[in-house]
């Protein structure tokens, strides 16, 4: 089972005080005009960027799972996401492609990007985020198979000049038929045009 942290609102005052300390420590004057409102803005930004911790995946999916005989592959590709790497608190962002083969249940298509949001708006590593999205579809739909592929650029690599600045990291999670059946998997990968495998 996936755990979701208890819903609570962030204490913005605490974050503001910490950001002020950070500004001082890097050699800035937090009282100069341009920075006066920065701690507040940063606190609000972190509230938004980490809101996945305060969302309940059950409530997101609730009421949008339908009985349906359709049993062909369902694909939602090019879902944009923005996340923060848990190692540096720097953004990584890109696209996620999601597919599943129903086994009597489907989920409303508009819920797929919402599910991505719940997991992307947390501190993450790309591999875990990809897996969590696949696990969620498995748990709520019990489909014949699930495939999730994410492609991302990591600012912690690009901005710090680590290795290739334009490299795209790819992670995938394949369950059921997507793992067991090479034809299903290659149909999915062809449809999303990921040819790096
Ligand atoms: Zn990082």
Image (tube, helix red, strand yellow):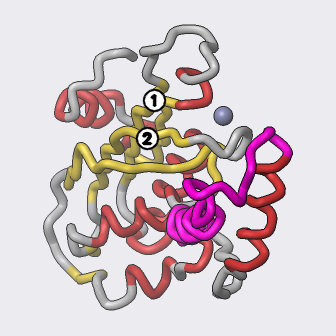
Q: Distance between the residues labelled 1 and 2?
A: 6 Å
Residue 52 appears in the picture as rendered: no
Q: In this view, does 65 lie above or below 136?
A: below
Which disc is residue 153 wearing? 1
Q: In this view, does 73 lie above or below 178?
A: below
Q: Which of marks 1 and 2 is nearer the N terminus?
A: 2
Q: Name the residue under label 2.
A: 93
- Which quadrant: the N terminus? bottom right
At x 59% / y 60%, what residue is drawn?
38
* Label 1–label 2 contact, CB within 8 A: yes
- Can you name the residue that lies furthest to the top here? 163
At x 58% / y 58%, what residue is drawn?
33
Relative horizontal placement of residue 6, taking residue 156 as reference (left or right): right
In the foreground, 5 or 67? 5
Q: Is residue 14 above or below residue 30?
A: below
| Boundaries of the magenta span | 25-51
Residue 138: image x %, image y %? 46, 63
């Amino acid at each position: 089972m996936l755990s979701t942290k208890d819903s609570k609102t962030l204490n913005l005052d605490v974050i503001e005080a910490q950001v002020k300390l950070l500004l001082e420590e890097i050699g800035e004057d937090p009282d100069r005009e341009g920075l006066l409102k920065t701690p507040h803005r940063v606190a609000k930004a972190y509230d938004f960027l980490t809101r996945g911790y305060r969302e309940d995946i059950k409530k997101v999916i609730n009421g949008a799972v339908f009985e349906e005989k359709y049993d062909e592959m369902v694909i939602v590709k090019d879902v944009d996401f923005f996340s923060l790497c848990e190692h540096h608190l720097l953004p990584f962002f890109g696209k996620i492609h999601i597919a599943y083969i129903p086994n009597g249940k489907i989920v409303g298509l508009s819920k797929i990007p919402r599910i991505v949001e719940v997991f992307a708006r947390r501190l993450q590593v790309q591999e875990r985020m990809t897996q969590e999205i696949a696990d969620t579809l498995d748990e709520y739909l019990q489909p014949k198979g699930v495939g999730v592929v994410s492609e991302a650029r990591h600012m912690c690599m690009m901005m710090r000049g680590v290795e290739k600045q334009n490299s795209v990291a790819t992670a995938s999670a394949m369950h059921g038929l997507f793992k067991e059946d090479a034809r299903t998997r290659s149909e999915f990968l062809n449809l999303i045009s990921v040819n790096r495998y």
